[in-house]
Amino acid sequence: MHKTGKGMKLRAGLALGILGVLGMGAGPMISLAQGTVPYGLKAGKPYNGTKLKFLICCLGAGQFAQMSKLTGEGGEFQQLTGISVQWENTPYGALQQKQLVEATTGGTTYDVAAWVDAWGEAIKPYLSPLNARIKADKINMREYPAAYLQAASDSSGNVIGIPLRGHPLVMFYRKDIFTNLRLPVPRTWQQVESTAALIQKRMPGTVGLSAMYGVNAGQNLFNWVSMLWGNGGDILDKGNHPVFNSDKGVQATQFYIDLLRKDKVVPPASTTFGETESSNQILQGKAAMWVGWWWYWAQFSDPKAVGPGVLNNIGFAPAPGWEGGTAQNYALVWPIGIFKTSKNQDAAWEFIKYVTNTEVQKKVASNRTDPKVADNTIVTFTGMNDPQVNAANGGIPKVGGQALRKARTLPQVRSWAEIQSVLEVGINKMANGAEVKATLDGMAKDVDAIQKRAGYYQ
């Protein structure tokens, strides 16, 4: 169960109480001649010569591309510690299965892994608890959004990972179109729909809203859960039973499907779109709005990546809420943890401290020297509010930080991989014409069977 409110605050509070943490082990570079090293790393290179293997994907992401160089052969991390790290560039679609195999078979190929929030429950038992290390190094976990902490902890309050990469949903929009048509920036999904319809009426040939309904690693769920939660619905209840087919769930889902099939404010091809295809609609100047992860800001501000008329014309705002409900943002996070089978536990912790350190993350997020690896992603509130980071990224980190204070994460259940498959296939079926209520009921029946097999209830 992962409802917001008292339950979520209690879990976060338990984790923080166990930690008893004080402050970030970060700071400016200190002269090594004084016998100290920056970022809270150990002096004296006690793990000199250690080579770590990191099970991860997506080195095309700017943040990962920069950090892989900082921690690889000859990088800053190796210079400070003598440790080098090989980042495994596994394709995203194969990463979850590869992590499960490594964890459940007792593999010793990898020392460290990073996972997408909802994947974690299946591999957390095979990762080392970090509470004692966090306390010893005085790492302030209050620097992270509560949703990030929930995804990085187990049900007993043990912290299993430290947030490495994370994103709130943000609404991107064409400032020139909104200015020319004198339109206010929508604050609810209902306003998004009416605004998109008006744009298409006044500007034939322009897509009002780009969206994604294709089956692709659960990407068609991102906006759906925002609507579901905003309307007061949920995926699972306190007992981990499916409840997304409730009246509120049906209402939110019908609205999501109607954007495509009834209102026709998104492209017909959206039934096959994932993140890349849907974001390309606004990137190439075809769409007026798109709701997606904040890291796309780096692409939208890259002169070589955008279509004509797009550069300097992309604005952003918090993801829309639900009219009469709430603005319930989905916070996606990649925690990073250590396999219990790793023979390099201490060296792996030094690596984790380095890549999650606010000063290192600020350095990466502020680096605009190469647009190909520019990335506004940063995971601590101090980093999100940092003036230099915001100056380098148009102010989007601060806006994202505000959204993350009330954000949620997906259910932390070990059966999520199966549940996600049912949900994303069902969303796609409805996008292609299947009746909403009947499809949701069938999906709930399938999820109920999954949860029984997983042992959550009889």
Image: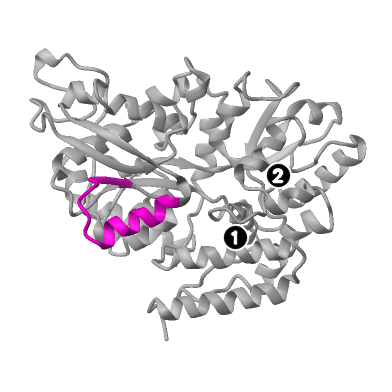
Q: Position of residue 144 (x, y in %)?
A: 38, 43
- Say which quarter of the image contains residue 293: top right
Q: Which mark is residue 229?
A: 1
Q: Is residue 328 left or right of residue 37?
A: right
Magenta span: 94-113
The residue shown at (67%, 50%) is 212
Is 352 located above or below residue 341 in the figure? above
Q: Residue furthest bottom?
A: 458
Q: Nearer the viewer, residue 22 or 307?
A: 307
Q: Position of residue 336 (x, y in %)?
A: 32, 45
The residue shown at (83%, 51%) is 264
Label 1 secondary element: helix
Amino acid of disc 1: Trp
Q: Is residue 350 left or right of residue 381?
A: left
Asked whether residue 249 is drawn in magenta, I would say no
Q: Nearer the viewer, residue 26 or 72?
A: 72
Q: Which mark is residue 18?
A: none
Q: Nearer the viewer, residue 251 or 117?
A: 117
Locate the C terminus and report the quarter of the image it occupies: bottom left
Q: Is residue 45 left or right of residue 377?
A: left
Q: Which mark is residue 187?
A: 2
Query: Rounded to the nearest whole Å, what is the CA distance between mark 1 and mark 2?
Result: 15 Å
Q: Nearer the viewer, residue 16 or 109?
A: 109
Q: Is residue 373 left or right of residue 76?
A: right
Colour logic: one colour
Amino acid of disc 2: Arg
